[in-house]
Image: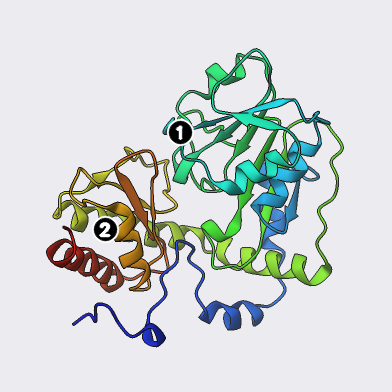
Amino acid sequence: MFVINPDSFLMPCYRISPFTTEHIASNNELSTNDFAIAYFNKKFGKGNWQFTYNGRGAIKLAIETYNLAPTDLITILTTSNNFYISSCVTKEIEKVCRWNREILPETKIIFVNHEFGYPFPDMDTLVATGLPIIEDCCTTFFSQDANEKIGQYGDFSVYSFPKFFPIQIGGLLVKNVDVVIEKSVLNKEESNYIENVLSYHLANAKDLLQKRKVIFDYAQEQFSNLGFTLRFNTSEKVVPSLLLLNNNSIIHDLNALKLFLTNNGIQSSVFYGEDAFFIPNHQNLAITQIKYFFEVIKFYLENNNE
């Protein structure tokens, strides 16, 4: 049995991130480990990357490298070409200059958001423009395209660790050009925390990815029984950061569904601009917890979908 509409003091908490309260203790108990350092040196080259406090910090450092004027323009492109874009991105750009969603003659930089783990479909065309590119890989840590070049097309790529690992802070800035960039402001404890948590989970990445696949495949099958479909096509090279579903006009008010899910301890959001929504899907969920998500949404359909 699953309790729907629980007392607010007895509500579960399922986040888009795999972080849970229990990880406060387990992360603190991890021993010193430099596996992550070796991993990133091999993947990106020694001296070509640095940890940041979060993904926003990585975006900030990348943008500041270009010495942009307030009137300059950064064009944001996304995998879906939907107008939806996180304020985490736009607010960092707005601190420096303007942004829009279409390449214009005055575009100074292309900011490519590989959305929800799904790579932008035509990076070669963007490279051919000759414009500088920043790749937002915050939700695309493990995903790749057919060319195996995601994160390498642009001058910079930025990552956010909480999207894939049970960690409370941590971003990554990678440079693919020979420039000097400002050092991120992290104290020793913060750096050690990020390094130790990532080292533990990257050393077990094969198991992590297998668990994510099992949960994703099961969730996809279950929600298809309610008529929902995947917003993006998947492939072996794609590791989604969450479960993004086409609503197919089933839910009459997606914002009301979002509130209902929140009141039942499930973080979610509407994919604004489209008839779609997303819910958590990661390695720290169990099959039974996906069943809980299913039953909560099924209950909403049967009792609240007016």
Residue depicted at x 44% and y 39%:
118
Relative side of 130 to 276, left or right: right
Determine if residue 244 is in view: no
Look at the numbered disc 1 and give the secondary structure of its residue.
loop
Which of 29 and 229 lies nearest the eye of the viewer?
229
Relative side of 161 to 13, left or right: right
* Residue at mark 2: 219
* Residue at mark 1: 79
Residue depicted at x 24% and y 46%:
247
Q: Is label 2 or label 1 in front?
A: 1
What is the spatial separation of the Cα atoms under label 2 and label 1, in whole angstroms? 22 Å
Q: Quadrant of residue 54?
A: bottom right
Question: Looking at the figure, which quarter contains the C terminus?
Answer: bottom left
Residue depicted at x 42% and y 75%:
13
Query: Which badge, 2 or 1, comes first in the chain's sequence?
Result: 1
Q: What amino acid type should be assigned to the residue bearing mark 2?
A: Ala
Figure disc tally: 2
Which of 96 and 16 lies nearest the eye of the viewer?
96
Question: Looking at the figure, which quarter contains the N terminus?
Answer: bottom left
